[in-house]
Image: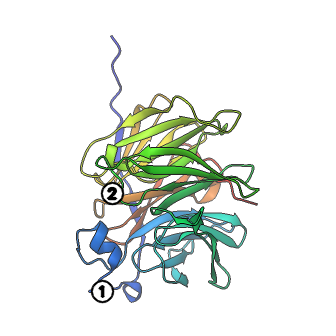
């Protein structure tokens, strides 16, 4: 008889919190009206990503802002614009590509704060609402188009924007596609499917198609998997905002570590950083905090579009 081992459970720690000067207390937003049941929010943090100098960038979705956080936890505003930025990855040393729920794919120059469009529409049609993205080592960009899809409307999409500009539709039947990450050999794409409370495993074929997509992991609770990251041992880290947890799953999808949020219960996304990429940083969105935890394995290097 095979028995699963009980995973280690421990608390993450608060690394830093959004300063009061940046909080939009009492300000109503269209994003919160649609996605937080009209509950006022002073921020909603997402999309942690590090640059080559160890600076951490996070997005504030409802107020169209991107912040930079230095290794000491000090915040500065990089950009503020008429959009709803979510997932972010570096295109090159100074340019972020942003999955913007309202506008499509955008570019942000982190030196000047200038925001320009990268891909606003597909065949003249707007996207449902891009959510997250990642690059492969060849510079191809994978992104999810979530919108308001869910079990009632399983039409969320996953796209690949090739380096030559070709846009491939990989999946169009996903009930709320969210975070995504590639395996180390880039032969498998993992996609968080929030409203199905699952992570899907998407094999990438040599001809660019996908085949035999399966449910790799199933969670529980009011809101399912969100941001994803991968470590050098092939373990998948899954942010679960409905539970305030980050799951660390071995290659058989067995939880080996569960990190709990000590501040709020909306742990939305994760990224490896710090010396040797051995610290996991997590956005906790209801309290406007960034959490961190020391890990026993380094995160995979995050590819850029360069």
User: What residue is disc 2 on?
Assistant: 261
Q: Secondary structure at mark 2?
A: loop
Quadrant containing the N terminus in the rendered view: top left
Quadrant containing the C terminus in the rendered view: bottom right
Q: Secondary structure at mark 1?
A: loop
Point 29% across, 77% down: residue: 41
What coloring was used for the rendering?
rainbow
The disc placed on residue 27 is 1
Residue nearer the viewer, 34 or 217: 34
Tell me the mark number nearer the camera, choosing from 2 and 1.
1
Tell me if residue 90 can be seen. yes
The percent coordinates of residue 218 (x first, y second) are 35, 37
The percent coordinates of residue 20 (x first, y second) are 36, 85
The percent coordinates of residue 10 (x first, y second) are 35, 47
Q: Work out whether 22 lies above or below 206.
A: below
Point 38% across, 56% down: residue: 12
Residue nearer the viewer, 42 or 256: 42
Tell me if residue 280 can be seen. no
């Amino acid at each position: 008889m095979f028995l699963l081992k009980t995973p280690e459970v421990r608390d993450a720690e608060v690394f830093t919190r959004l300063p009061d000067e940046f909080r939009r207390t009492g300000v109503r937003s269209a994003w919160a009206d649609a996605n937080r049941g009209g509950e006022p929010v002073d921020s909603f943090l997402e999309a942690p990503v590090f640059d080559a100098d160890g600076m951490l960038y996070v997005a504030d979705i409802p107020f169209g802002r991107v912040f930079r956080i230095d290794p000491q936890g000090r915040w500065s505003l990089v950009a503020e614009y008429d959009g709803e930025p979510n997932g972010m990855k570096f295109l090159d040393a100074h340019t972020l590509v942003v999955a913007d729920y309202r506008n499509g794919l955008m570019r942000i120059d982190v030196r000047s704060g200038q925001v320009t469009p990268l891909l606003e529409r597909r065949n003249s049609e707007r996207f449902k609402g891009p959510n997250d993205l990642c690059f492969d080592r060849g510079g191809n960009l994978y992104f999810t188009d979530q919108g308001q899809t869910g079990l009632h409307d399983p039409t969320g999409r996953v796209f690949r924007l090739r380096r030559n500009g070709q846009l491939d539709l990989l999946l169009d039947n996903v009930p709320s596609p969210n975070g995504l990450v590639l395996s180390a050999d880039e032969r498998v794409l993992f996609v968080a499917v929030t409203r199905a409370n699952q992570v899907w495993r998407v094999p990438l074929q040599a001809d660019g198609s996908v085949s035999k997509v399966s449910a790799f992991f199933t969670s529980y609770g009011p809101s399912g998997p969100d941001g994803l990251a991968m470590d050098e041992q092939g373990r998948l880290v899954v942010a679960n905002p409905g539970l305030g947890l980050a799951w660390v799953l071995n290659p058989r999808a067995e939880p080996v570590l569960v990190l709990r949020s000590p501040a709020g219960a909306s742990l939305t996304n994760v990224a490896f950083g710090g010396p040797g990429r051995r610290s996991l940083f997590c956005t906790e969105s209801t309290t406007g905090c960034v959490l961190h935890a020391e890990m026993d394995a380094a995160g995979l290097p995050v590819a850029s579009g360069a």
